[in-house]
Image (cartoon, rainbow, N blue to C red):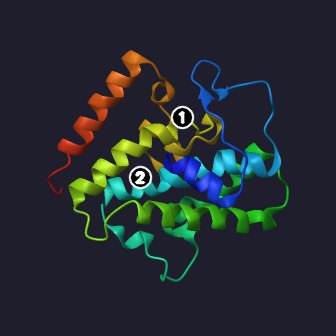
Amino acid sequence: MNIIETIQKNLGFSALVKIDPNTQDTQGNDIIIGNDAIAQAGIPAVLLGIYNKLESNPDLTILNPGQPGSCLEKIFGKSTDLIVKRIYDYSRIQDMHSIQQLEHIASESMRVVRDNLSPTASEKEIRSFVAKHKTDTLLYLPPVLRIGTILKNNNLDDQTGKMEGPVSSFMHHIEKTFNTSGNNTKG
């Protein structure tokens, strides 16, 4: 089971749907709205926010549960309000009080990522973990969120990240190799 499925099941949401790389929409005919849409947008967005943070600064302290403040703000910083608004726009939910649901997603995402990494994980191990799981997470991210633009990481909005198949799988493997081997120095 991948991390997205773990979080989705732990929180009791319906299964998330992969994004079709050709149409840039969810696969299938069903329109996703409400809580399912919050999960569809929120879980991959939060995970990619965590991965983005860990990729730029492979320090596990951002995952510590005892730190004061909002989990979403720890992950997204000054971009929190814009990301929350885009998730609400995607889900067609007008009630801004449901930020608690996104906080719950963020808290569970941080816990699951923390549980999948050793507390003494090296920078290389953290970057390897991120590279391994980021591609899977991108498959579920609705492109309308434009998370990469907000987080200043164009790789997150790259439509080719959602492609699957033998050639795409090979290219993702090369990307993971370069991400984990090319980041051994601090800079």
Compared across the picture, whether 103 is left or right of 97 comes to: left
* Amino acid type, callout 1: Leu
Query: Residue at point 72% right, 64% down?
Result: 101
Decide if residue 82 is in sight here: no
* Amino acid type, callout 2: Asn
Front position in the image: 117 or 41:
117
Residue 58 against residue 74 in the figure, above or below: above
Query: Residue at point 61% right, 32% down?
Result: 18
Residue 139 disc label: 1
Which residue position holds label 2?
A: 52
Question: Residue 55 placed where, x, y %?
Answer: 34, 53
Compared across the picture, whether 4 is left or right of 37 comes to: left
Residue 123 against residue 169 in the figure, above or below: below
Q: Earlier in the sequence, mark 2 or mark 1?
A: 2
Query: Residue at point 54% right, 34% down?
Result: 139
Front position in the image: 185 or 122:
122
Decide if residue 85 is in sight here: yes
Local crowd at mark 1 within 10 Å, few (<14), some, or many (≥20)? many
Can you tell which quarter of the image residue 16 is in?
top right
Query: Residue at point 63% right, 37% down?
Result: 142
Q: Residue at the left extreme?
A: 185
Question: Residue 180 placed where, x, y %?
Answer: 23, 44
Question: Residue 19 placed where, x, y %?
Answer: 61, 30
Compared across the picture, whether 31 is left or right of 113 comes to: right
